[in-house]
Structures are given as C-alpha cells and as structure tokens.
Image: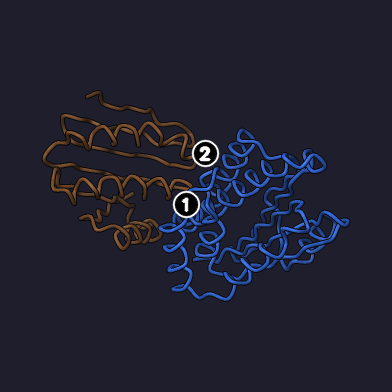
Chain colours: A brown, B blue
Amino acid sequence: MDNLFIPQENKTPLVQCNYALGQIQFNGRSIPENSIEFYEPVFKWIDNYVLQPQKETQVNIHLEYFNTSTSKCLLDIFKKLYQMHQAGTSKVLITWIYEEDDEDMLEAGEDYQALIMLPFAMKKVST
Amino acid sequence: MFNVFDFYEKMEDGKIMLSFKGVITPDLLSSILQIMESKLDNLGEEPRQRKKVYNVLVECLQNLYHHGEVLTSTPALADKASLFLIGRNDNGLYRIITGNYILNKSIPELKSKIEQINAMNREQLKAYYLQTLNNEFYSEKGGGGLGIIDIARKSGQKFDYSFSKVDEEFSFFSLVITVNNV
C-alpha cells in the first residue's frame, strides 16, 4: 500500500500517512475553504488502510489552527479509525499535540475525546 | 452600508485595523488573513489572544465567502459585495463587523439561530457545538453551520446584529462580534 504525503501550504497542513509505520500525521494549519476536497485523499487512504492495518495505528495531530469545516473532517477520520479499533484489527492511539499556552486547542482535543471512544493522549509542547 | 460605518465610528475607542468591501474570493481571503496575521504579530498580542482573533477571522471570512457562493445563484445578488471591518480598542478588545446581502425570506431562520446562540452560556455553547459537529450531515461546502457557534465560543461575548431592509426581496445583514481580551 502506498504512503500519502501532502506538503504543507498556506492554508493546509503537512499530511503524512505511512503504511509500514501505521502512522498518520497532520502538522501546521488547516483552514481551507473546502476541507472535504482537501481531506478526500486522506479519507481514501484510511479506507484502504483499515482493510489491512498494522497492529497499532498512531495518529499525531499537531495543528496550530483549524477551521470548523476541518473539524468535521477530523471527526470523520476518527470515526473511520474507531470502527477499525472497535473491530480489534488495530489498536489506535490519537496523540493530540497542543502548544502550552493554547487552551483552546486543548479544549478542541477534549471535545473529540468526548465524542469518540478512542484512546487520546494530550501532549503539551512548548512554543 | 452607511449605518454600519456610523455605528463603527461611534464605538468608543474604535480603531479600524482593516476594512474591506468587495466580493470575497479564496485568494483575497488569504491576503486578508496574511495582513491580519502580521498586524497581530506586530501588536505583540499574547499567543492565545492572537490565535483566538485569527480563528474568529477565519470563520467570519469563510462564512462571507460561502454565503457569497450561495448568492451567486441568485442573479440579482451575483455581484453584491460583502463588507468586513476589524478594529481594536486601547484595551485590546477586538470588534469584527461583517455585512452582506441576504434574501428577506432567509432572515427568520438566521435570526432565530443567532438569538438561540446569544441565549447560551459557555457550557451550553460547548454542548451545542458538539451536538452539531456530531449529528449534522456535511453541508455541500463542509461548513455545516458550525462556524457561527465556534465564533460565539471563541468571542465570549453576545452577537450584535441587524437587518436593514433594502427592498421587498433583500436586506443587508450586519453582524458585530466582540472578542474579549484574554
């Protein structure tokens, strides 16, 4: 299965989906006008990944900003991963990375934690 | 249009950082955000406040942009511009004002949504946000009405708004968002 790499741009994050490592990473900001269009390749990659996943799947979300249309896409991604986690084919860990002064980003992570029954780790990094 | 500007000038300590009237495009949106980002940096705003203001800006501008797309399907409104203003007073309180044309028949729904949000406290807004995020289907543009709830959560203040009737079909909708200094 191919890896997915989308370079960082002004309004969109760096996306790295690595099959061998079972790793999905977003870094940067995610404020595209049309988030569904941007995240479409990620949805597709995950749909393929869940058919033959690694034993463990690590998801690292390190976003500086994201808009509300991205928040829908993130939830969609978590829901796809939840099904796989629930089925027991791969153990998922979401690491939600936020900068130490960014309470809003921590709260956003906690919002997802409240909605999705996946293990979340909140990780504070210094700016 | 003038009503909003008068209102703005009357605001105590109101200082405009940026104002724009025109049709919002993705490129233009990027430019405005870039300008505002450097202005926020130059002001030496606390990172948390900077992010809050930036977040509210993104949602406001994208609301205007997506609303503009809806309007283009109404020929009479296709070239109608949006209005956008941001000001910061000496106490670090930000005011963001948006203005756009709206069909009169769309007013009741929008008005009741704003009133509903204005009546909510912080906890209720969070619950409403989560409920909307979780239950609502994707809108075609991916927004799904979350933007306005998110703006309310970030701003920490009630919305001020008005509808000025233009004619039998259209009104001008203005929304004033205040962002608390954290």
- Residues tagged by mark 1 and mark 2 found on one chain of the structure: no
Left or right: B123 as drawn, with respect to B145:
left
Please tell me which residue lies in front, B78 or A60.
Answer: B78
Q: Chain of mark 1?
A: B
Please tell me which residue lies in front, B181 or A121.
Answer: A121
Is mark 1 in CB contact (under 8 Å) with mark 2? no
Mark 1 and mark 2: Cα distance apart in space: 15 Å
> Residue B70 appears at what percent x and percent y?
68, 44
Residue that protrudes farthest toward the right in the picture: B167
Q: Chain of mark 2?
A: A
Left or right: B177 as drawn, with respect to B156:
right
Secondary structure at numbered mark 2:
loop
Residue type beneath disc 1: Phe
The disc placed on residue A34 is 2
Instruction: Bin the neighbour count of mark 2 within 10 Å (Cα to Cα): few under 14, some 14-19, many 20 and up.
Output: some
Residue type beneath disc 2: Asn
Q: Residue at x 74, y 49 (%)?
A: B83
> Residue A54 appears at what percent x and percent y?
14, 36
Q: Residue at x 51, y 45 (%)?
A: B142
Q: Quadrant of residue A122?
A: bottom left
> Residue B170 appears at what percent x and percent y?
82, 54
Where's the N terminus of chain A, which quadrant? top left
> Residue A127 appears at what percent x and percent y?
34, 49
Instruction: Bin the neighbour count of mark 1 within 10 Å (Cα to Cα): few under 14, some 14-19, many 20 and up.
Output: few
- Mark nearest the camera among 1 and 2 is 1
The disc placed on residue A49 is none
Q: Residue at x 32, y 60 (%)?
A: A115
Report the residue marked by disc 1: B137
Please tell me which residue lies in front, B83 or B90.
Answer: B83
